[in-house]
């Protein structure tokens, strides 16, 4: 839940960080009002001769001409002020809201104030704020208290229009009513906290209002909008989407991202995807792949490494003597005689055992 102290502290910090543009922007509608007053004064003096003639006619009993001239002069001044308010001050208020909304994140440029006059946003700003003013005026005219409540219900409309370029007029009004539920009284108390500054501005002939009070109030309004957005829409992105990646319909340029539910918190590391490999960790080993830094797996059907070849059962063993024929009996006489016999003569070295068996004696 937002509190007045934090809002005003954040507003002062943002205001001081971009002081002179923040002073200039709120002075623009003041200058327009001064220009309007000057035009009314000129209009009144231009009709002074007609008013004198009307007064003379009234003394002669012709009151109808006198009232027509007075009514015509007043109607013309009201018409000029109304048209100027609808077609100039309404989109200008949207531009001022955008300037201070951007300035609540980073020092904003003066050109932000023209946002309400760009493209299709101009007619939307004119129409939406005209409907808002019509509803508030009707409430004040019929029943003062309902008009006062409507004034606070539609308080955030300029900021919604500045923040979301795609919102319709009726959706902007509806969204403002929803956002201000439960916040009207606290907003009223917030406004009362500036009474001291407004009184001091009177004693300084409006100089304090220009150089401190008005920028301070506008900056606090922007902080109020941000705080209410974060509280009332925790599960939905606002129009800043803030990094969608759009701010007022345009890509972010030198604008810090707005914090919302779908955005990474400022100055924090990006959230790791559960299906993504964790940061600063070793690659996950595939269970079917050979483990890292391990010896190759020996195939059970292949010859083991660093072992002697397997001897064939039907092959003569390595480094062994030739196998003696089990059917040939060695001749001891020939062995004793040594090398006197021819090695190739096998009959001289061996005695046939078949003869021994037949004769019974050697």
Image: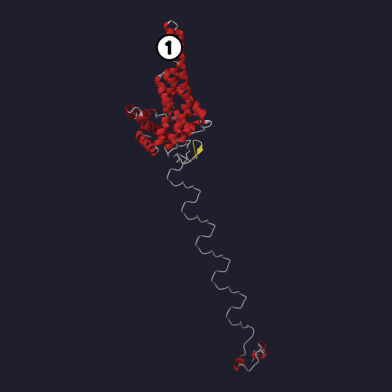
User: Residue 214: which quarter of the image?
Assistant: top left
Which residue ends up furthest to the front in the rendered image?
49
Q: Is residue 160 left or right of residue 4?
A: right
Q: Position of residue 187 (x, y in %)?
A: 38, 29
Which residue ends up furthest to the top in the rendered image?
61
Instruction: Classify mark 1: residues with Cα within 10 Å, few (<14), some (14-19) or many (20+).
Output: few
Residue under the point 47% across and 24% down: 84
Q: Would you say residue 70 is visible in this rendering?
A: no
Q: Is residue 61 above or below residue 245?
A: above
Element under disc 1: helix
User: Residue 78: which quarter of the image?
Assistant: top left
Q: Foreground residue, 270 or 288?
A: 270
Q: Is residue 341 above or below residue 50?
A: below
Residue under the point 43% across and 8% down: 56
Tag 1 residue: 52
Residue under the point 39% across and 28% down: 184
Quadrant location, the C terminus: bottom right
Q: Is residue 313 above or below residue 335?
A: above
Q: Where is residue 14 in the image (x, y as percent from the top left)?
A: 39, 38
Q: Foreground residue, 353 or 358?
A: 353
Q: Foreground residue, 234 or 252?
A: 252
Q: Position of residue 95 (x, y in %)?
A: 46, 32
User: Residue 176: which quarter of the image?
Assistant: top left
Counting the numbered discs, the total is 1
Q: How is the image coloured?
A: secondary structure
Q: Foreground residue, 310 or 230?
A: 230
Q: Would you say residue 126 is visible in this rendering?
A: yes
Quadrant location, the N terminus: top left
């Amino acid at each position: 839940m937002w509190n007045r102290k934090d809002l005003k502290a954040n507003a002062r910090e943002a205001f001081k960080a971009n002081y002179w543009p923040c002073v200039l922007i709120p002075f623009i509608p003041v200058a327009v009002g001064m220009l309007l007053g000057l035009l009314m004064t000129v209009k009144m003096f231009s009709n002074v001769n007609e008013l004198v003639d009307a007064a003379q006619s009234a003394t002669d009993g012709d009151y109808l001409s006198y009232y027509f001239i007075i009514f015509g002069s007043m109607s013309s001044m009201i018409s000029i002020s109304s048209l100027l308010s609808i077609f100039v001050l309404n989109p200008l208020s949207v531009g001022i809201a955008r300037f201070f909304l951007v300035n609540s994140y980073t020092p904003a440029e003066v050109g932000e104030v023209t946002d309400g006059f760009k493209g299709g946003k101009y007619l939307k700003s004119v129409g939406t704020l005209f409907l808002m003013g019509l509803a508030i005026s009707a409430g004040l005219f019929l029943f003062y208290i309902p008009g006062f409540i409507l004034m606070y219900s539609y308080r955030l409309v300029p900021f919604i229009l500045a923040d979301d370029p795609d919102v319709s007029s009726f959706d902007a009004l509806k969204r403002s009513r929803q956002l201000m539920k439960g916040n009207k009284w606290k907003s009223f108390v917030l406004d009362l906290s500036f009474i001291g500054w407004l009184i001091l501005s009177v004693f300084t002939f409006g100089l304090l209002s220009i150089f401190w009070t008005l920028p301070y109030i506008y900056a606090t309004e922007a902080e109020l909008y941000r705080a209410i957005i974060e509280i009332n829409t925790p599960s939905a992105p606002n129009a800043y989407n803030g990094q969608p990646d759009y701010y007022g319909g345009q890509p972010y340029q030198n604008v810090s991202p707005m914090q919302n539910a779908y955005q990474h918190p400022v100055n924090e590391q990006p959230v790791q995807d559960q299906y993504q490999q964790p940061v600063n960790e070793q690659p996950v080993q595939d269970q079917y792949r050979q483990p890292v830094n391990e010896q190759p797996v020996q195939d059970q059907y292949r010859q083991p490494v660093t072992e002697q070849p397997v001897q064939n059962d039907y092959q003569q063993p390595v480094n062994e003597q030739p196998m003696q024929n089990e059917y040939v009996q060695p001749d001891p006489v020939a062995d004793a005689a040594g090398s006197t016999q021819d090695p190739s003569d096998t009959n001289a070295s061996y005695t046939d055992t078949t003869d021994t068996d037949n004769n019974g004696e050697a």
